[in-house]
Image (cartoon, rainbow, N blue to C red):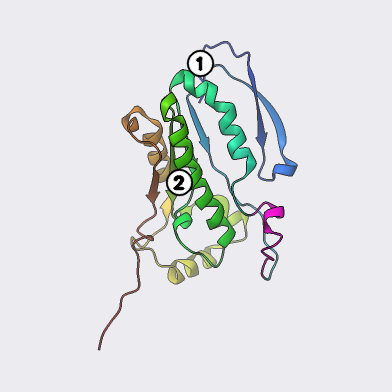
Amino acid sequence: MWSSGEKRSPHVPILAGSNPHQCTPLMLPIGKLWKLLKNPQVERKIPKGWIDHRVVPAKGLLGLPDNIIHLTELAIPYLEKTKGNIINVSSALSQKTNQMSPFYAISKAALDHFARNYASLLASKSIRVNNLNPGVTETAFASRHGVTAEMRQKMIKLFPIPLNRWGTSEEMAEFLCFMASEKASYLTGQCINVEGGILIDSPTIKFD
Protein backbone atom coordinates (compact mmCIF):
# COMPACT_ATOMS: atom_id res chain seq x y z
CA MET A 1 0.00 0.00 0.00
CA TRP A 2 1.45 3.34 -1.01
CA SER A 3 0.92 6.60 0.82
CA SER A 4 -0.75 9.48 -0.97
CA GLY A 5 0.75 12.91 -1.46
CA GLU A 6 4.33 11.69 -1.13
CA LYS A 7 7.17 12.55 -3.46
CA ARG A 8 7.71 9.34 -5.41
CA SER A 9 11.33 9.52 -6.45
CA PRO A 10 12.91 6.14 -5.56
CA HIS A 11 12.07 3.32 -7.95
CA VAL A 12 11.72 -0.25 -6.76
CA PRO A 13 12.07 -2.99 -9.41
CA ILE A 14 9.23 -5.52 -9.28
CA LEU A 15 8.80 -8.68 -11.35
CA ALA A 16 5.25 -9.30 -12.52
CA GLY A 17 4.38 -12.81 -13.61
CA SER A 18 4.15 -16.40 -12.38
CA ASN A 19 7.26 -17.67 -14.20
CA PRO A 20 10.51 -16.05 -12.96
CA HIS A 21 12.06 -16.56 -16.40
CA GLN A 22 9.16 -14.92 -18.24
CA CYS A 23 8.44 -11.99 -15.95
CA THR A 24 7.88 -8.40 -16.95
CA PRO A 25 10.21 -6.02 -15.10
CA LEU A 26 8.39 -3.03 -13.65
CA MET A 27 9.86 0.06 -12.04
CA LEU A 28 7.46 1.25 -9.37
CA PRO A 29 7.98 4.80 -8.10
CA ILE A 30 7.05 4.84 -4.41
CA GLY A 31 7.05 7.18 -1.47
CA LYS A 32 6.25 5.23 1.67
CA LEU A 33 5.59 1.52 1.81
CA TRP A 34 3.23 0.45 4.56
CA LYS A 35 2.41 -3.19 3.86
CA LEU A 36 3.98 -5.89 1.70
CA LEU A 37 1.66 -8.74 0.66
CA LYS A 38 3.14 -11.68 -1.24
CA ASN A 39 1.20 -14.59 -2.70
CA PRO A 40 3.57 -17.04 -4.42
CA GLN A 41 1.76 -19.65 -6.50
CA VAL A 42 2.61 -22.74 -8.50
CA GLU A 43 0.71 -22.05 -11.72
CA ARG A 44 1.95 -24.63 -14.17
CA LYS A 45 0.50 -27.87 -15.42
CA ILE A 46 2.56 -30.90 -14.48
CA PRO A 47 2.98 -33.54 -17.20
CA LYS A 48 1.33 -36.86 -16.53
CA GLY A 49 3.40 -39.34 -14.57
CA TRP A 50 5.80 -38.88 -11.69
CA ILE A 51 8.31 -36.07 -11.68
CA ASP A 52 11.92 -37.12 -11.33
CA HIS A 53 12.92 -35.72 -7.94
CA ARG A 54 16.45 -35.12 -9.24
CA VAL A 55 15.29 -32.42 -11.67
CA VAL A 56 12.63 -30.76 -9.54
CA PRO A 57 14.91 -28.05 -8.06
CA ALA A 58 16.11 -27.10 -11.54
CA LYS A 59 12.52 -26.61 -12.66
CA GLY A 60 11.84 -24.28 -9.77
CA LEU A 61 9.07 -26.38 -8.29
CA LEU A 62 10.73 -27.03 -4.96
CA GLY A 63 11.77 -24.68 -2.18
CA LEU A 64 11.41 -20.93 -1.83
CA PRO A 65 11.50 -18.74 -4.97
CA ASP A 66 14.41 -16.29 -4.98
CA ASN A 67 12.08 -13.38 -5.76
CA ILE A 68 10.34 -13.81 -2.38
CA ILE A 69 13.56 -13.03 -0.53
CA HIS A 70 14.61 -10.40 -3.08
CA LEU A 71 11.34 -8.47 -2.85
CA THR A 72 11.44 -8.61 0.95
CA GLU A 73 14.97 -7.25 1.07
CA LEU A 74 14.02 -4.40 -1.28
CA ALA A 75 11.06 -3.48 0.92
CA ILE A 76 12.83 -3.55 4.30
CA PRO A 77 14.23 0.05 4.22
CA TYR A 78 10.78 1.43 3.39
CA LEU A 79 8.96 -0.72 5.95
CA GLU A 80 11.46 0.26 8.63
CA LYS A 81 10.57 3.92 8.16
CA THR A 82 6.83 3.31 8.38
CA LYS A 83 6.92 0.46 10.93
CA GLY A 84 5.03 -1.55 8.32
CA ASN A 85 4.59 -5.29 8.10
CA ILE A 86 4.84 -8.24 5.73
CA ILE A 87 2.17 -10.85 5.06
CA ASN A 88 2.76 -13.95 2.94
CA VAL A 89 -0.09 -16.07 1.64
CA SER A 90 0.92 -19.65 2.38
CA SER A 91 -1.35 -22.69 2.58
CA ALA A 92 -2.71 -25.17 5.09
CA LEU A 93 -1.04 -27.80 2.89
CA SER A 94 2.29 -26.64 4.31
CA GLN A 95 1.42 -28.73 7.36
CA LYS A 96 0.03 -31.83 5.63
CA THR A 97 1.34 -34.42 3.22
CA ASN A 98 -0.28 -34.25 -0.19
CA GLN A 99 0.21 -36.85 -2.91
CA MET A 100 -1.55 -34.76 -5.56
CA SER A 101 0.70 -31.71 -5.19
CA PRO A 102 3.67 -32.57 -2.96
CA PHE A 103 5.98 -29.88 -4.33
CA TYR A 104 3.39 -27.18 -3.76
CA ALA A 105 3.10 -28.30 -0.12
CA ILE A 106 6.89 -28.39 0.27
CA SER A 107 7.34 -24.89 -1.14
CA LYS A 108 4.62 -23.52 1.16
CA ALA A 109 6.32 -25.17 4.15
CA ALA A 110 9.48 -23.31 3.16
CA LEU A 111 7.47 -20.08 3.05
CA ASP A 112 6.25 -20.71 6.61
CA HIS A 113 9.79 -21.10 7.88
CA PHE A 114 10.79 -18.00 5.90
CA ALA A 115 8.16 -16.04 7.84
CA ARG A 116 9.38 -17.30 11.21
CA ASN A 117 13.03 -16.56 10.45
CA TYR A 118 12.42 -13.13 8.92
CA ALA A 119 10.12 -12.24 11.82
CA SER A 120 13.05 -12.94 14.13
CA LEU A 121 15.43 -10.94 11.95
CA LEU A 122 13.16 -7.91 11.58
CA ALA A 123 11.57 -7.70 15.04
CA SER A 124 14.22 -5.25 16.21
CA LYS A 125 13.17 -2.96 13.33
CA SER A 126 9.51 -3.20 14.43
CA ILE A 127 8.60 -4.95 11.17
CA ARG A 128 6.11 -7.75 11.70
CA VAL A 129 6.11 -10.84 9.43
CA ASN A 130 3.20 -13.27 9.37
CA ASN A 131 1.62 -15.85 7.07
CA LEU A 132 -1.99 -16.52 6.23
CA ASN A 133 -2.51 -20.24 5.57
CA PRO A 134 -5.84 -20.70 3.77
CA GLY A 135 -7.50 -24.02 3.16
CA VAL A 136 -9.42 -24.80 0.00
CA THR A 137 -10.78 -21.47 -1.21
CA GLU A 138 -13.12 -20.62 -4.05
CA THR A 139 -11.04 -18.60 -6.51
CA ALA A 140 -10.33 -18.62 -10.24
CA PHE A 141 -7.15 -20.64 -9.62
CA ALA A 142 -8.92 -24.01 -9.98
CA SER A 143 -10.88 -23.06 -13.11
CA ARG A 144 -7.72 -21.75 -14.78
CA HIS A 145 -6.26 -25.21 -14.35
CA GLY A 146 -9.21 -27.06 -15.81
CA VAL A 147 -11.13 -27.91 -12.63
CA THR A 148 -14.81 -27.95 -13.59
CA ALA A 149 -17.80 -27.57 -11.27
CA GLU A 150 -18.40 -31.32 -11.50
CA MET A 151 -14.80 -32.06 -10.57
CA ARG A 152 -15.09 -29.63 -7.68
CA GLN A 153 -18.08 -31.51 -6.26
CA LYS A 154 -16.15 -34.78 -6.49
CA MET A 155 -13.22 -33.17 -4.69
CA ILE A 156 -15.49 -32.09 -1.84
CA LYS A 157 -16.71 -35.67 -1.45
CA LEU A 158 -13.25 -37.23 -1.71
CA PHE A 159 -11.58 -34.71 0.59
CA PRO A 160 -14.18 -33.77 3.21
CA ILE A 161 -13.81 -30.53 5.14
CA PRO A 162 -15.22 -30.54 8.71
CA LEU A 163 -17.16 -27.31 8.06
CA ASN A 164 -18.56 -28.90 4.87
CA ARG A 165 -17.69 -26.09 2.48
CA TRP A 166 -14.85 -24.24 0.77
CA GLY A 167 -13.71 -20.88 2.05
CA THR A 168 -14.29 -17.65 0.14
CA SER A 169 -11.83 -15.02 -1.00
CA GLU A 170 -13.80 -12.45 1.01
CA GLU A 171 -13.19 -14.43 4.21
CA MET A 172 -9.48 -14.60 3.50
CA ALA A 173 -9.40 -10.86 2.79
CA GLU A 174 -10.90 -10.16 6.22
CA PHE A 175 -8.04 -12.02 7.90
CA LEU A 176 -5.44 -10.31 5.71
CA CYS A 177 -6.83 -6.89 6.61
CA PHE A 178 -6.77 -7.76 10.31
CA MET A 179 -3.21 -9.09 10.18
CA ALA A 180 -2.06 -5.93 8.39
CA SER A 181 -3.81 -3.60 10.83
CA GLU A 182 -2.72 -2.14 14.14
CA LYS A 183 -5.16 -4.50 15.83
CA ALA A 184 -2.55 -7.21 15.19
CA SER A 185 0.40 -5.07 16.30
CA TYR A 186 1.58 -7.77 18.75
CA LEU A 187 1.46 -10.57 16.18
CA THR A 188 4.64 -11.66 14.41
CA GLY A 189 6.23 -14.90 13.22
CA GLN A 190 2.86 -16.65 13.11
CA CYS A 191 1.13 -18.84 10.52
CA ILE A 192 -2.61 -18.30 10.82
CA ASN A 193 -4.63 -21.28 9.59
CA VAL A 194 -8.02 -20.46 8.08
CA GLU A 195 -8.95 -23.82 6.62
CA GLY A 196 -12.36 -25.05 7.72
CA GLY A 197 -10.88 -27.65 10.05
CA ILE A 198 -8.88 -29.81 7.63
CA LEU A 199 -5.87 -29.79 9.96
CA ILE A 200 -7.92 -31.25 12.81
CA ASP A 201 -9.78 -33.77 10.67
CA SER A 202 -8.94 -37.42 11.36
CA PRO A 203 -10.60 -40.72 10.42
CA THR A 204 -13.10 -42.06 12.90
CA ILE A 205 -12.38 -45.52 14.24
CA LYS A 206 -15.49 -47.60 14.84
CA PHE A 207 -15.41 -50.74 16.94
CA ASP A 208 -18.00 -53.51 16.57
Q: Is residue 174 left or right of residue 113?
A: left
**Magenta: predominant secondary structure element?**
loop
Task: Look at 74% across and 43% down and name the residue there.
Answer: 21
Task: Look at 60% across and 14% down and name the residue there.
Answer: 8
Give the label on residue 205, or none.
none
Q: Position of residue 92 (x, y in %)?
A: 44, 54
Query: On the image, numbered disc 1 is attached to which residue?
Result: 4
Disc nearer the start of the sequence (2/1): 1
Whole-number angstrom distance, CA of label 2 to CA of label 1: 27 Å
The segment highlighted magenta reads: 50-61
The part of the image, by quadrant, that contains residue 186 is top left
- Asked whether the beta carbons under mark 2 and mark 1 sit within 8 Å of each other, the answer is no
Residue extending furthest bottom?
208
Q: Position of residue 4 (x, y in %)?
A: 51, 15
Give the label on residue 169, or none.
2
Q: Position of residue 22 (x, y in %)?
A: 74, 42
Q: Is residue 164 above or below residue 41?
A: below
Q: Residues within 10 Å of mark 1 (few under 14, many from 20)?
A: few
Is residue 120 in view from this perspective? yes
Task: Look at 47% across and 47% down and name the residue there.
Answer: 112
